[in-house]
Amino acid sequence: MTGLLLALAAGAVVGLALGGLGGGGSVLAVPALIYLLGLTPAEATTASLVIVTVTSVTALTGHARDGHVAWRTGLLSAAAGIVPAMLAGAAAGHLPQSVLTAGFACVAGLAAFRMLRPVRKQPPGPIRPAKAGAAGAGLGAVTGFLGVGGGFLAVPALVSVLGLAMRTAVGTSLLVVTINSLAALIARAGTGTHLDWAVTGPFTGAAILGAWDGKRLAEKVAGETLQRVFACVLLAVAASMLADVLL
């Protein structure tokens, strides 16, 4: 019963982050699955891909209905990330657990610093396929290796490089996250990693509900405020995971 309650609570927080910020939820999902629910790093990153894929689709529908998705930009970025996500996802199953944990801690710290830095918006202009593709390829590789959607990197890139408005960047990042996560999950299907549905199922269900609340919260609270709060949580998580590997 305790494990079920922890899965539900952690899932709700992850959903709030994905729905409100367009990314970052999976950066909390993996440590929650490892330290609260007892999964190995390989199992946690695989379960995270399931959770993020399903939850991102849910959050994406709401943003798409409100017209906050730049479909061409998102599809260009996502298409470029499919192959890197699948290759990295297949390779991740052969890495030592300590390497995955340390890599994840570094990415969580990077995500926190990116959220604390102000995003400089560029004036809107024609979409450059090369820029969208380069960003998508990098996000795909991160998704495949560490089981994170990459939305925490996608949103700043979409705003500062491609000139999207913040709300449109959030919705578009969910499209990229969904496709990249699904590609990485397909690649991991053949690695033999165990997936604990008793944990993954409730976690995903709570995350879906949380994503709807996160979208409503984002409409009432300034995006910068949400990012700062979430960034502080991520810094604490990153420091804890890195200490666990090094000490």
Image (cartoon, rainbow, N blue to C red):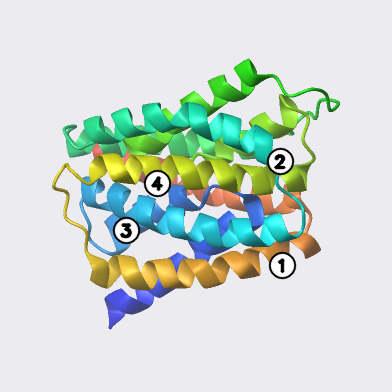
- Tell me, yes or no, whether the two marked residues, 3 and 4, touch with CB atoms within 8 Å: no
Residue type, label 3: Leu
Q: State the image coordinates of residue 236 (x, y, percent, origin top left).
A: 47, 47
Q: CA distance from mark 1 to mark 2?
A: 20 Å
Q: Residue at image x 84%, y 28%?
A: 124
Chain-order first, disc 1 or disc 2: 2
Crowding around mark 4 (Cα neighbors within 10 Å: few <14, some 14 to 19, many 20+) is many
For marks 1 and 3 on the same chain, the one whose residue lies earlier in the sequence: 3
Q: Indicate the amino acid at tag 1.
A: Arg
Residue 164 image offset from top left, x and y in percent = 77, 35
State the residue at coordinates (53%, 37%).
111
Q: Which residue is mark 1?
A: 216
> Closer to the observer: label 1 or label 3?
1
In the image, is 131 to the left or to the right of 184? right
Q: Which residue is mark 2?
A: 70
- Residue ID at (53%, 62%): 15
Nearer to us in this view, 72 or 35: 72
